[in-house]
Amino acid sequence: AQSVSQHNHHVILSEAASLELGCNYSYGGTVNLFWYVQYPGQHLQLLLKYFSGDPLVKGIKGFEAEFIKSKFSFNLRKPSVQWSDTAEYFCAVNAGNTDKLIFGTGTRLQVFP
Amino acid sequence: GAGVSQTPSNKVTEKGKYVELRCDPISGHTALYWYRQSLGQGPEFLIYFQGTGAADDSGLPNDRFFAVRPEGSVSTLKIQRTERGDSAVYLCASSPAGLAGKGTGELFFGEGSRLTVL
C-alpha cells in the first residue's frame, strides 16, 4: 500500500530564512506527487505537482520541489519565506493508474516577522 | 458557486445518532472524493466517485459509513450510529476527471464539515 511520511511536524522560521520540508513515499511503481497547502481558516489548495519530466517543479508563491526517485522523496523548498507562508503543508502521492490520493500527516509552518 | 460547497459547516450530535453531510462539487466535475481529517493528521481517503458510481470505497472505515451521488453531482456522506471516534473534519473534493489518465491532477477542496460526536 502507498504511504507518505512527513518528518517535520512543526517548523518555526523567521522571515527570509530558507525552507525545506521533507516528504518520503513508499510505492515502487510510477507515482504522481503533490504538495497541498492550507492557510489558516482556508481550504486545502494545490501548491505544485509532479507527473513526469523535469524532476524540479515550480509552484505558486516561489515554492519548488524536487523529485528524487532513488530516494523516494519529494521535498518542498523555498529560498526565502514570508510571514504569509504560515500554513500547514501536506505532501500527497497518487499511484500512477489509480485515482486515490494519499496524504502525509502534514507540517505546520510558522513564520515570524 | 465557484467552489466546492459543503454543508453543514459544523455539526454537533450525540453518540448513536445518524448524520448526513452534503457536498456540492464544482459544476462539470465528474470526480468527487470524500476525506476525513482528524486533529493533527492529514486527510484520510474515504471514497471516490466517478460520475454516479463509487469507483473506490476502500477507505470507508466500516459499514456505518455510506456515501451516495445519485445524479453524478451532489454527494451525501451518511454516518449511522455515530461514535465519539467519528469526530473529525469531513472534506469533500472534486476534480474535472480524477487523477489517473487525463486528469489535471488537482483536487479542489471544500472547507469541510466539522463533526463533533458527544
Image (cartoon, grey):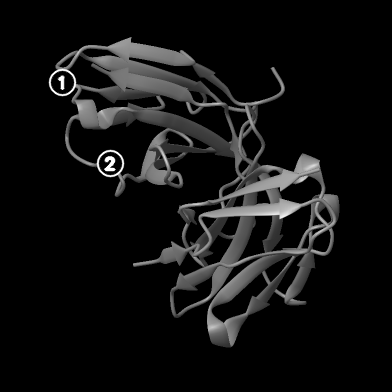
Task: Depth check: give the residue in front, B48 or B12.
Answer: B12
Task: Depth check: give the residue in front, A43 or A13.
Answer: A13
Specify whether residue B75 is in view. no
If you read the primary sequence from the N terminus, does the residue marked by circle 1 or circle 2 appear first?
2
Check if mark 1's residue and mark 2's residue have beta carbons within 8 Å.
no
Q: Secondary structure at mark 1?
A: loop
Q: Secondary structure at mark 2?
A: loop
Residue designated by label 1? B81
Badge 1: residue crowd in 10 Å (few <14, some 14–19, many ≥20): few
Does residue A45 lie above or below B101 as drawn?
above
- Quarter of the image containing the C terminus of chain B? top left
Residue designated by label 2? B60
Question: Mark 2 belongs to which subunit?
Answer: B
Q: Position of residue B8 (x, y in %)?
A: 46, 13
Q: Is residue A47 left or right of residue B42?
A: right
Does residue B97 lie above or below B5 as drawn?
below
Q: Which quarter of the figure has residue A41?
A: top right
Q: Residue shown at 52%/51% (left/top)?
A: A106
Q: Which quarter of the figure has residue B96?
A: top right
Question: Mark 1 belongs to which subunit?
Answer: B
Does residue A25 lie above or below A42 as drawn?
below
Q: Is residue A21 left or right of residue A7?
A: right
Q: Residue shown at 71%/54% (left/top)?
A: A13
Q: Residue shown at 80%/60% (left/top)?
A: A17
- Quarter of the image containing the N terminus of chain B? top right
Amino acid type at mark 1? Arg
Q: Position of residue B85 (x, y in %)?
A: 23, 32
Amino acid type at mark 2? Leu
Q: Which mark is residue A47?
A: none
Q: CA distance from mark 1 to mark 2?
A: 15 Å
